[in-house]
Image (cartoon, rainbow, N blue to C red):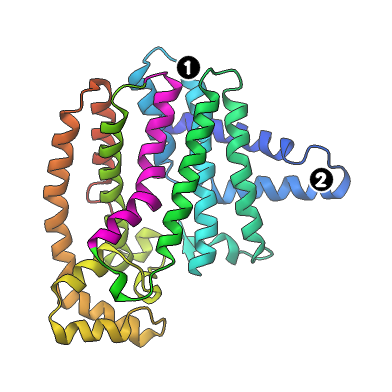
Amino acid sequence: MATKAAVEHALVGMRRVLASRLTSGMHGVDAERARKRIENLVTETVMCGKKERSRLLVDTYMALEPEGDFEAAARLSTSMELMQSFFLVIDDVMDQSVTRRGKPCWYRRPGIGLGAINDGLLLDTAVDLSIRTAIPNHPNKDAILAALAVTKRKTVVGQLIDNSIEGLGDCNWSRYAQLVEHKTSHYSYFCPVELAMLLADVSADVAHVQKICYDIGYLFQSQDDYLDVFGDETVTGKVGTDLKEGKCTWVTCRALEKAPPEEKKILQENFGKSDDASVANLKTLVKHLRVDDDFQKFQTPFVMTLEDNIRKLPTVKLRGVLLSAVERIVNRKK
C-alpha cells in the first residue's frame, strides 16, 4: 500500500477510535452528539490535508527499517495530522482567517464559531491518545510522547512570537529565523523524522538531522510567506492575510531590507492595517520592489545548498527521504 493511502486508512480507523474513546462514560443524546461532532471535526479538519508530515514519518521509518512494521508507522503518523489540525484550527481563529484548503475555516462553519477553540483542544487531547493507541507496547512510547510534548511547547511559543509583532521594527531576519524554527520547522519536519527514528530505535546523528530539517522548514515557511502575497488564491485555497495582520514574514523582511526611505514610509503607513486601500498599497509596493523576483533568486541557491548538505548526511538511509521531502515542495504553488 502506498504511504498516503496507508495514512488515510489509518486515519479512518483512528477517527472511529477517537470518537469512541473521547466519549467513553457518556450516554444518551449527549454521547451521540459528541461522537458526531468529533467524527465531523476529524473528517473536515484532519483528513482533507496533504498529509506531508505523516508521509514523512512513515517514509523515514521505512527507510530506516525496510522490514519494519509499516502499519504501526502509519498509525503513529496520525498523531502528526491531529497535531497539525489542532494548530491550524486555533491559528485560523487567532488570525481571523477566511478560508483553509479551499473551504471556510472551521470556526466560520455554521454552528461552530468560537466553539472551534474547544474543538482544537479536543484534537490536542487526541494526539496523546492516538499514540497510546498506535503503539501501546513500544519500548520508546514514552520518549515519543515526550518528543510530541516538546514539539507542542515549541510551536505554541512560535505562535506567541508570531502574534507579538508590534510593527516593522520587529521585522528582521534574526527574528524571522527564530520564528520559523519555533512555529514551523520543528513540528513540520524535525518532529516527524524524530518520531520515525524513535520508532525505529535509531539515535545516531540527531543534531545533524535536526539542522537539515530546520532548513527544510525554513524553505517551506518562506514559500508560504511568498504564496500568501503572490500566490493564486484559487490554487492555494486560502486568502492571504499576512500584510494586513502585520506579520514578520520573508516578504516583509525583504521589502524592508531593500526599500529606499520614501518607500519605507509607505510600508510604515500601511503595514498591519486591514482596510482594502492599505492592503492594496502594500501589494503594489512589494511588486514594485520586485520582491517576487528576489524570492526566486533566494530559493534556487538555498535548495542547491540544502540538497548538497543532505547528500553529505552521515546517516545514509535518510538521504533519499529528505531529498524527496525537498523535491515535493520546490516551486510549489500551494
Could you tell me residue 134's position as x and y percent? 58, 26
Could you tell me residue 173's position as x and y percent? 23, 61
Asked if 67 appears above or below 97 in the picture, the reply is above
Name the side, left or right, on which 199 lies relative to 112.
Answer: left
Residue labelled with disc 1: 69
Start-end of magenta stretch: 173-202
Q: CA gap, disc 2 to disc 1?
A: 34 Å
> Which residue ends up furthest to the right in the rendered image?
28
- Asked whether residue 188 is drawn in magenta, I would say yes
- Tell me the element at label 1: loop
Q: Main secondary structure of the magenta part?
A: helix
**Rendered residue at 79%/37% (across/down):** 24
Could you tell me residue 279's position as x and y percent? 34, 80
| Label 1, residues with CA under 10 Å away: few <14, some 14-19, many ≥20 | some
Q: Amino acid at mark 1?
A: Asp
Instruction: Point out the tag, 2 or 1, that comes first from the N-terminus.
Output: 2
Quadrant of the image containing the C terminus: bottom left
Give residue 31's mark: 2
In this view, the residue in front, 271 or 3, is 271
- Asked whether residue 283 is drawn in magenta, I would say no
> Which residue ends up furthest to the top in the rendered image?
67
**Rendered residue at 41%/39% (across/down):** 53
- Tell me the element at label 2: helix
